[in-house]
Image (cartoon, rainbow, N blue to C red):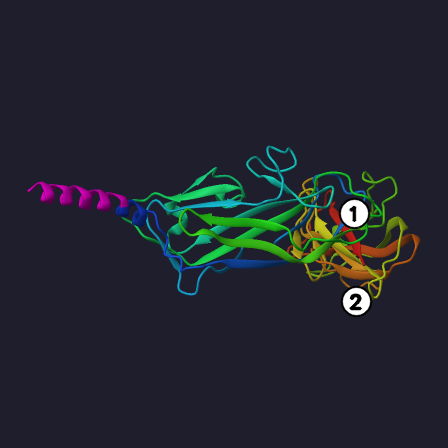
Amino acid sequence: MARSCKYNVVWSVAMALWLPLQAVACDFPAGFFVRREVNVGDLFIGRDAPIGTVIKASPHLRSERFHPTGITCKPGSRFDVDSPLPKIFNSPLVPPGDVILQTRIPGIGVVVAGHMSGGSVDNRWTRVPREGFQGWGVPHHATHDTPGVWLGIISSGLYYRFIKIGPVEADMGVQPLAGHILAELTNNIGGRVMEMVITSGSINVAMCGLPGAPATQVTVPMGTWRTGQFRGEGSVTDTQTFNVPVQACQAGTNPRNQNFAALRLDPRNGSSVLDAQRGLLGLNADSDATGVAVQVLKADLTPMPLTEEVQMVRMTNGDLNIPMAARYIQVGTDTPVGGVANASLGFTLTYK
C-alpha cells in the first residue's frame, strides 16, 4: 500500500509540471525562424530640413505570411517585440507612445511597428504598452490571455518611418541602411522566431539649399479675375510663371536618372488635391471663393502631377531655378463665386 501511495504522488506531480508547459506553447516547428527582408529604397534628406522631418514612411502596413499553414498559440503565449537599436523614449519629435530607434547614421532615426494577424487575433492579444501604430509599436510585448481560445497567426506586418532627429553632415555621402534590424519577435517557448531587417537602401543629404532656408516661401501673384471670365468647367485664366529657386547645389553622379532633379508637391494649409495628374489644387482654409482651383503646370504648360516625384531639370553645380506656372481653373458646372482664392503647396527636391 505504501508503494501504491508513493506511485500516485509522483504521478500527480508529473502531471502538474507537464500541463502548464503545454498551456503556454505555440506550435512552432523545431528550428522555426523567419527573416523578413525590407528594401527601403534610396532616401534623401534636405540639409536644411528641420529636425523632426519625416524622410520616408512606408505607404501601408506591409504584411506577409508568417507561416505557410499558420501558427497556433494557446492561452498564456507571449511574444516580445524589440529591436537591438538604441531607443529614444518620450521624444517631442513623435506622437506620444512612439519610440525612436537610433540608426547608425548620425541624425537619422526610425519609428517601427510590427504586428501579427489572423482572424480575431488582434483583439485577443494584450499588448504592453499599447502604444504606437495600432498599438504594436516597437518595443512591446503581447500576451494571449483569452481562456479556452487557440489563436492562429497567419501573417506578420511592418510599418516604419524614418525621421531626421538631429543635425546631419552635409558631406557625409551615401550611407547604407542595410543591416539595421527593425524588429525581433521572441516567443516564450519557441525563442527568437522572427526578425525584420533592412537588406537594401541608403540615405544621403540632398546638396541643395533654399535662400534663407528654412523660412523661404515662393509667392505666386495670381492676379484678379472676374467670375464672368470663366465659361464652364475646365475654363482657365492666363498662366502666371514663377521659379522655385535653389542654391549651392552639387550635381549628382548616379547615371540611372541622368543627374536630374525630381520635385514633389504636397498640399499645405488646408489645400487638398482635387486631381493629382491634372495638377489641380483646392483652395486653402483662408479662401472664401468657390468653384475654382489652382492648376500647377510645368514650364511647358503641361500639368504638373502632385504628390509624386516628377523629373524636372538637369542638375548643375551652383544655383538654379526650376521654372513653373500656375493658373485658375473652373471646377464643377456652377458659376464660380468671387472672393479670396489662395492655395498652398510644399515642395521636396531630390536628386542623385
Q: Is residue 59 visible?
A: no
Q: Secondary structure at mark 2?
A: helix
Residue drawn at (40%, 43%) of the image:
143
Task: Give the tally of numbered discs.
Answer: 2
Q: Main secondary structure of the magenta part?
A: helix
Q: Residue furthest left?
A: 1
Q: List the residue tagged with mark 1.
A: 46
List x then y, in percent, for residue 332: 64, 57
Mark positioned earlier in the residue sequence (2 or 1): 1
Amino acid identity at mark 1: Gly
**Residue 9 drawn at (x, y percent):** 16, 41
Q: Quadrant of residue 117?
A: bottom left
Q: Residues within 10 Å of mark 1 (few under 14, many from 20)?
A: many
User: Does 49 sit above or below residue 178?
Assistant: above
In magenta segment, residue 4: yes
Q: Label 2, label 1: how many angstroms apart (C-alpha)?
A: 20 Å
Q: Is residue 121 left or right of residue 298?
A: left
* Figure quadrant of the N terminus: top left
Residue 6 appears anywhere in the view: yes
Magenta region: 1-17
Residue that carries the numbered disc 2 in the rendered image: 256
